[in-house]
Image (tube, rainbow, N blue to C red):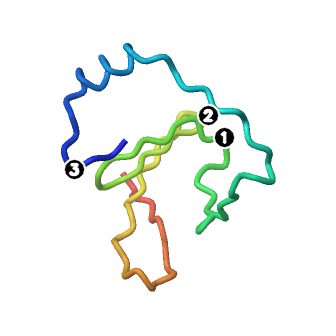
Amino acid sequence: MSSQNTPPLSSILATMQERKPTVHPVQSKTEVAFLQPTMVKTIHGDPCVGVYFREDVMVTTDKRGRVSTWQRPTPTPPNSNSSSLSEVKT
């Protein structure tokens, strides 16, 4: 949901409770767009169990309890293809 003038959360919740959910049929795999990743980076040797997004960083946790903080990339011009994440050592 997006809007220039977003109603208060209580109003949105009340509207959701008044309406019955809309159920859409499942589309076949050939009808759904597949987005290719723009970047692939191994961030933990063990399975990642949490990803938390903050305004300035992303925080990841793995199965062994390690926590990594990743600085978000700076905005790039629309025609640039570079993208990177850099780990912040804490």
Label whose residue precedes the other's in the sequence (2 or 1)? 1
Name the element at disc 2.
Answer: loop
Q: Nearer the viewer, residue 28 or 86?
A: 28
Which residue is drawn at the image coordinates 42% and 56% (left, top)? 70
Q: Amino acid at mark 1?
A: Pro
Q: Which residue is mark 3?
A: 4
Q: Is residue 4 left or right of residue 65?
A: left
Q: Outermost residue, top direction?
A: 18
Q: Secondary structure at mark 1?
A: loop
Amino acid type indicated by mark 3 = Gln
Q: Is residue 53 left or right of residue 26?
A: left
Q: How far across and down, in percent of the image, does residue 6 sit? A: 22, 40
The picture places residue 35, in percent across and down from the top left corner, at 65, 61
Can you identify the residue that label 2 sits on?
63
Q: Residues within 10 Å of mark 1 (few under 14, many from 20)?
A: few
Tag 2 and tag 1, C-beta contact below 8 Å: yes
Residue 54 at x, y percent in the picture: 33, 47
Q: Name the residue rendered at 60%, 41% in the picture.
A: 48
Q: Amino acid at mark 2?
A: Lys
Q: Quadrant of the N terminus?
A: top left
